[in-house]
Amino acid sequence: MKTGFNKHRHKDWIRSTAILALLALALGAGGCQFLGLAAEDTIGVAVKPEYRGLEKQSVAIVVYEDASTMFTYPQAQQEVSAFVAASLKKHLPKAHILDYHLVLNYQNANPNWDVLPVKTIGLHFGVARVVYIELLDYTVHSQKTNYVLQGDIKAHVVVYNTKIPGNGDVFHTTINAQWPKSGPLPGYNTDANTVRMNTLQRFSTHLAHCFYTWHNRGNGYAN
């Protein structure tokens, strides 16, 4: 009885193996493509950094906001600095990110700091790189009406290398982040603080993507 049971199992195994072999032959290269797509869904597609120069460097974050933004959102400079610093520390652990409070204190003590070359500010703190963020838009209200909420942070971002001659501009890009991405929400469904925090998180994540290899898993997910 025991021997017969083993024979049946052996036949089933042979049958299963044959079916898998036939499937592999039928799929051919298409099977490899299928497995590749499955892997991409799991680990994502690697996206290389646009600029690698922050790795193992000392970095200062400098945020500029115009008078209108400062009046409407007086906390914007500090919030952007905090979120970007946290994101860079998370994804660039070998970089030394200067305490952003030191930069904010410097800006408050020198009202005309924005007329100085950005490279000069970096030299003041003795850092190798400066991530300069010029806020272009910073709002939690939809551009169409104030009765619905949608965060929008847009900024021109420039990296300065303080160790080279000239103004030190080595990388620049524009980052634009909205939350929710699908469209504005009625005010009764959320609050301005929640919208602002989520938008800041998305903005800082997009900005950090410029400087390290990340994996795009589709549907808005990334790591």
Image (cartoon, rainbow, N blue to C red):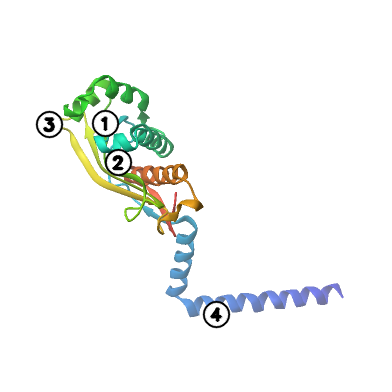
Q: Residues within 10 Å of mark 4 (few under 14, many from 20)?
A: few
- State the image coordinates of residue 186 (x, y, percent, origin top left): 45, 55
The one nearer the camera, 173 or 184, is 184
Q: Write down the residue under mark 1.
A: 129
Q: Write down the residue under mark 2.
A: 52
Q: Name the amino acid type tagged 2.
A: Arg
Mark sitting earlier along the chain (3/4) = 4
Do tag 2 and tag 4 residues touch (Cβ < 8 Å)?
A: no
Q: Name the amino acid type tagged 4.
A: Leu
- Asked which secondary structure carries label 4, the reply is helix
- Asked which secondary structure carries label 1, the reply is strand
Mark sitting earlier along the chain (1/2) = 2
- State the image coordinates of residue 4 (x, y, percent, origin top left): 82, 77
Mark sitting earlier along the chain (2/4) = 4
Do tag 3 and tag 4 residues touch (Cβ < 8 Å)?
A: no
Q: How far apart are marks 1 and 3 (CA)?
A: 14 Å
Quarter of the image for residue 169 reads top left
Do tag 2 and tag 3 residues touch (Cβ < 8 Å)?
A: no
Instruction: Report the disc number at residue 22.
Output: 4
Q: Is residue 190 visible?
A: yes
Residue in the image at 22% along x and 32% along y: 161
Q: Distance between the residues labelled 2 and 3?
A: 20 Å
Q: How far apart are marks 2 and 4 (CA)?
A: 47 Å
- Asked which secondary structure carries label 2, the reply is loop
Q: Name the amino acid type tagged 1.
A: Arg
Q: Write down the residue under mark 3.
A: 166
Q: How far apart are marks 3 and 4 (CA)?
A: 65 Å
Observer-side mark, 1 or 2, equals 1
Mark sitting earlier along the chain (2/3) = 2
Instruction: Report the disc number at residue 75.
Output: none
Q: Is residue 14 above or below residue 80?
A: below
